Image (spheres, rainbow, N blue to C red):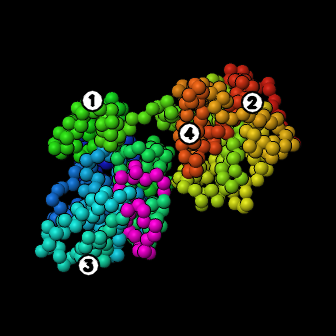
Amino acid sequence: MTCNNVLSYQTHKYIEEYFQLIESGKIPACKEQFQLIDYCRKVLSRNDIYIDTQKVEDSVNIPARYFPYELFPWEKFVNVFVFGVRWKDDSTLVFNRYFLYMGRGAGKNGFVSWDGFFMMTKQHGINNYHIDVVATNEKQAKISFDDIYNVIGEHEKKLKKAFYRSKVKIKNNTTNSSFEFNTSNARTKDGKRTGCVIFDEEHEYENYDTIKVFTSGGGKVDDYREFHISTDGNVRGGPLDDLKEEARMILNGELDIENSTLFPFVCKLDDPSEVDDPELWAKANPSLPYNKTLKRKMMTEYRQMQRNAAIRIEFMTKRMNSPIEDTRFEVASYEDRLATNQPIPPQLKGQEAIGGVDFADVRDFCSVGVLAKYKGKRYWLQHTFIHHMALELQDINKDIIQLAVDKGIAEIVYGKSIEPQRVVNWFIDKAKDFYIKKICLDTYRAAILGPKLEEAGFEVMVCRTGSFTHSKLSPIVDDCFINQTLVFGNDPLMRWYVGNVYVDYLGNGNKEYKKIDPEKRKTDGFFAFLHALNADHDLEDYGDVDLGSFSFKPIIV
């Protein structure tokens, strides 16, 4: 807001109504909703964006003539960004992916049924706009389809000429736009020019196979859209976790509309203990204040969960979007990972450093980095070489990779392989800024890479891996993250690496760091950091020493 009650951003009545509900406290909201408000105001303050008010009004009013329910305030708010917020230069959508993450019973399916109906009409303004809803089973996939099918049936006199409907397809006869349901075992599409794909209950998706099949035809018609609607679930490391991570990055200011077109509507408890206050349940379900029947049912489930652990897990995961997890298995909380985004002091230049390398496969990822200490903190500065075939053959989050490339902390390598000389050259370059005492790597590539590093004048330390070494290093890792004394700088790729690792507690009391997923959840930067920690005791913290009298000369041969 600016003075004299003049708004500093473009807006719409549905936006302001929702903002007022949240900011006044009339509807309890989680931290992510307040972050979303700040993000929306930032986006809407741009002078290269406008709001198509008529399209927004049509998206609300046209289906309202036929549907047996009304949209809730949060749904009208979201529709402004689904249909109205556009770039001035070409009128394309600013957001074309919508992540609706909220507790079971919030009406996600009813919302996409409403929008799906509108997107087939002439008021939407696009002919041959084909909509697919996808789920892992036919029953779930048909929910929104049946909503629209039944609406047309209940208004048969008015809509019979406008729509064709069968048990498998609904089509608007004027626009030739259609709505169909699909299950995730579909292997091919029929070449249809898809306008919108709705991925329902994405928490059940274990990989990107389905998503790739149904998005491959996107972008051939105007206003291509993807809806990703889901509660939380029990599949970890899948597409839903990637969406949650992308949403966190957007809401925390790490990604903007130049880097991501995702609209992150996230609803969850801020803390699991809030489940004991039913007045706060709306944090996970913004529709709950308008649905007394649902609240009574949830109260029954809440009482049952006090006596039944299985019901408690289901309630916390599906109703509250607060899955019960054993935090021991997390290397670092998201907040502690985010705390690594601290500035790199100029005084770090000239310090002692330990190099670390993780180089498992010449056609995959290779991470290198230097570890230094300064005024009680450890600094890890990494760089990643990525072979282009790894991105083509594996289900890797390409958005985080592109962001890393743009920031200069990663680079795509073309050719037959990642040559060891690239690693050597990187350390030679870093030796201009640091006195690199030694470079640590595991035995896997030591035979090839070790001699080349030694030829360049570096001391090489070959490290053991596995539970014995990891158990020895884990107190340092835990201390660094918990006390937030580990600094990566503004390195989202390194934070992603850490988030892709879990701690496996072994029966003999030891622990081992392992990948959440063997392929797409890359961990190379974290393991390069672990290798460097093997020589952590060789580093001195000169933060309280005047370095003016010292003259470090890099080792370069």
Q: How many marks?
A: 4
Amino acid residing under circle 2: Glu
Residue 428 visible (yes or no): no
Instruction: Look at mark 4 in the image and give the residue it sits on.
Output: 501
Mark 4 or 1: in front is 1
Residue 157 is left or right of residue 256, and the answer is left
Few, some or many C-alpha atoms within 10 Å of disc 2 (few <14, some 14-19, many ≥20)? many
Q: How far separated are the C-alphas under marks 4 and 3?
A: 52 Å
Mark 1 falls on what kind of element? loop
Instruction: Look at mark 3 in the image and give the residue it sits on.
Output: 173
Amino acid residing under circle 3: Asn
Q: Position of residue 386 (x, y in %)?
A: 65, 53
**Among the two numbered marks 1 and 3 on one chain, the one whose residue lies closer to the N terminus:** 3
Q: Position of residue 505 (x, y in %)?
A: 55, 30
Most foreground residue, 240 or 7: 240
Mark 1 or 3: in front is 1
Instruction: Look at mark 2 in the image and give the residue it sits on.
Output: 352
Quadrant in which the N terminus is drawn: top left
Res. 278 mark:
none
Most foreground residue, 296 or 412: 296
